[in-house]
Image (spheres, helix red, strand yellow):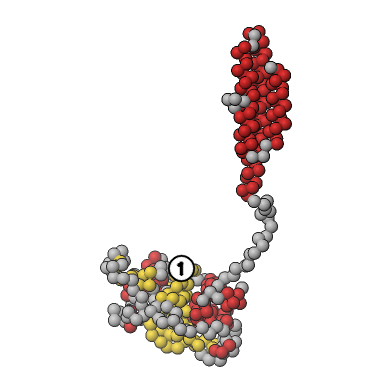
């Protein structure tokens, strides 16, 4: 029996390392330790062994069992490792650069937005944000736009279906609109904070416009608001001048042209003229609207107009980007044409 056990172990040590598949492994395992295996046969013979020899032979069998188990484990681990390697495919070096990584770059509108916000941050403005879906109160009423104001006409404003009415806004049951301008953020900020306030709010705006070279139903604006004691038109002019010079250089000229907005009084259009604006050089170009905050707006948000004054301005981001880069069609910004976008990489 002793010789038989040694023979079995020898066989196992020779055969198991040569096993290369699961079925081969299972077959070999059955041959050695299965119910009809070689070791099992030895154990059955124990019944007919003289009593005196039993302890010694029993120990030999146990040792053989342990040795076989170790050989089987080693073979199984080898198979596991081989199967894992096959599943993973070729070994990869994750530290190598990927073979195809074209560098992305910021969209020209994003670049322009960052340029504008960076400039106003230097002037002490913080960035503020507000929702694109607004109730009429924030978009119009609070900004002193009476019910019959032309901007509230269905032509200009995108309304949500009547069943999507607000029950949580100041006036309760009012329509939701896609904000037609970022001026709604002025209202939100003034309701949330006490003056002095100095914020800039870039974001999307929406109008019922038919798309052409200079119009888009979805565009972007940058809104500015400064509320403090004794803010004047001088401050408005000097802030906008500093901003425009930062963007277009020192040779640019600015002009505040009298205009009308319900939420500012007096109101102006900011025009600029520069020699380096391509096709639009040396002509007065409108950049945006501005003015001093109308006292009625202060009243609507609970700020005392006897104590506080303010200035506000709003401009189109696309307009600024078009002037900066000599782009003549607003639709380029939304077409996602890589030939266009790569020029700003
Ligand atoms: N909200 C105005 C517009 O969309 C721009 C503006 C903002 C004018 C702030 C004055 C003050 O045209």
Q: Within the image, what quadrant is residue 175 found in?
A: bottom left
Front-most of residues 303 and 344: 344
280 relative position to 68: left or right: left
Residue 304 visible in this rendered orientation of the protein: no
139 to 46, vertically: above or below: below
The tally of labels here is: 1
The crowding category of the residue bearing disc 1, from other C-alpha atoms within 10 Å (few below 14, some 14 to 19, many at least 20), is some
Task: Residue 50: give x, y in percent of width and height.
Answer: 64, 9
Name of the residue lying farthest toward the left:
173
Front-most of residues 234 and 25: 25
Which image quarter is the C terminus in? bottom right
Front-most of residues 286 and 32: 32
Report the residue at 42% width, 68% height from top. 130
Report the residue at 64% width, 24% height from top. 38
Task: Residue 316: give x, y in percent of width and height.
Answer: 47, 79
332 relative position to 59: left or right: left
Front-most of residues 104 and 112: 104
Q: Within the image, what quadrant is residue 10 found in?
A: top right
Q: Within the image, what quadrant is residue 83 found in?
A: top right
Residue carrying label 1: 128
123 relative position to 204: left or right: right
18 to 34, vertically: above or below: below
Name of the residue lying farthest toward the bottom:
282
Which image quarter is the N terminus in? top right
5 to 156, vertically: above or below: above
Task: Residue 293: give x, y in percent of width and height.
Answer: 39, 78
């Amino acid at each position: 029996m002793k010789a038989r056990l040694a023979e079995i172990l020898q066989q196992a040590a020779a055969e198991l390392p040569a096993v290369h598949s699961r079925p081969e492994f299972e077959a070999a395992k059955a041959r050695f330790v299965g119910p009809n295996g070689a070791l099992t046969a030895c154990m059955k013979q124990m019944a007919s062994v003289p009593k005196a020899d039993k302890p010694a032979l029993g120990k030999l069998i146990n040792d053989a069992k342990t040795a076989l188990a170790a050989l089987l484990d080693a073979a199984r681990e080898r198979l596991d490792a081989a199967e894992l390697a096959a599943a993973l495919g070729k070994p990869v070096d994750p530290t190598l650069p990927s073979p195809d990584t074209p560098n992305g770059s910021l969209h020209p509108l994003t670049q322009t937005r960052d340029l504008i916000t960076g400039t106003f941050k230097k002037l002490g403005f913080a960035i503020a944000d507000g929702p694109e879906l607004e109730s009429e109160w924030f978009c119009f009423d609070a900004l002193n736009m009476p019910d019959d104001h032309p901007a509230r006409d269905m032509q200009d404003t995108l309304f949500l279906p009547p069943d999507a009415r607000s029950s949580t806004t100041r006036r309760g049951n009012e329509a939701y609109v896609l904000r037609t301008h970022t001026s709604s953020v002025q209202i939100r900020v003034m309701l949330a904070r006490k003056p002095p306030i100095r914020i800039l709010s870039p974001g999307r705006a929406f109008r019922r416009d038919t798309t052409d070279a200079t119009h888009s139903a979805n565009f972007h604006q940058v809104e500015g608001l400064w509320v403090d004691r004794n803010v004047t038109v001088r401050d408005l002019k000097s802030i906008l001048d500093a901003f425009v010079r930062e963007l277009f250089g020192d040779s640019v000229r600015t002009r505040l042209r009298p205009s009308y907005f319900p939420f500012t009084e007096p109101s102006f259009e900011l025009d600029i003229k520069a020699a380096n604006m391509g096709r639009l050089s040396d002509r007065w170009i409108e950049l945006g609207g501005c003015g001093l905050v109308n006292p009625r707006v202060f009243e609507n948000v609970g700020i005392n107009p006897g104590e506080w004054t303010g200035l506000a301005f709003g401009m189109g981001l696309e307009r600024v980007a078009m002037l900066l880069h000599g782009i003549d069609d607003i639709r380029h910004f939304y077409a996602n044409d890589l030939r266009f976008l790569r020029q700003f990489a």
